[in-house]
Amino acid sequence: MLFAVLANVGLITGALAGVGRNDLVAIRDAVQKGELLPLPRIMELALARVPGDVVKTELESERGRLIYEIKILTPQGSVREVKLDARTGSILLVEDD
């Protein structure tokens, strides 16, 4: 299952790709219950690790675990991907995209 939320130059555009209404309700409920960190907090954690501008975010399920994937355009012009645990915010992986 894939939930995608696009962001452009650090600002959420509100464009949702492939996310149904039930998915959005489930995501909102999970954030309200503390089961998922809200996207602004995730972006803050990712940008602390890799400074730049957020150009894309995704919420994915990998082996039953929810993972945020944040793509960041660095000041040097490269794109780096930061994967974070959606529940704890711990950084799982940083790699060039």
Image: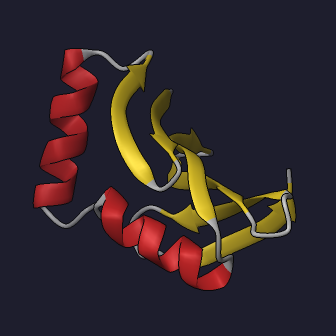
Where is residue 8? Give x, y as percent: 51, 43
Q: How many marks?
A: 0
**Residue 31 sits in which quadrant?**
bottom left
Left or right, 44 with reference to 74 = left
Q: Is residue 64 visible from the viewing direction of this image?
A: yes
Q: Colour scheme in the image? A: secondary structure
Q: Residue at x 62, y 45 (%)?
A: 63
Residue in the picture at 86% in, 58% down: 78
User: Which percent across, then down, holds residue 13?
Assistant: 36, 35
Frontmost residue, 1 versus 89: 89
Drawn side of residue 53 relative to residue 20, left or right: right
Q: What residue do we see at 20% from left, 18% from top?
A: 21
Q: Residue furthest bottom?
A: 48
Quarter of the rendering containing residue 49: bottom right
List x then y, in percent, for residue 83. Answer: 65, 62
Q: Is residue 5 above or below residue 29?
A: above
Residue 69 visible in image: no
Residue 86 at x, y = what percent? 44, 61
Q: Nearer the viewer, residue 15 or 9?
A: 9
| Nearer-the-camera pick, 49 or 10 | 10
In the depicted structure, whether residue 17 falls above or below residue 33: above
The residue drawn where x is 59% and y is 61% is 53
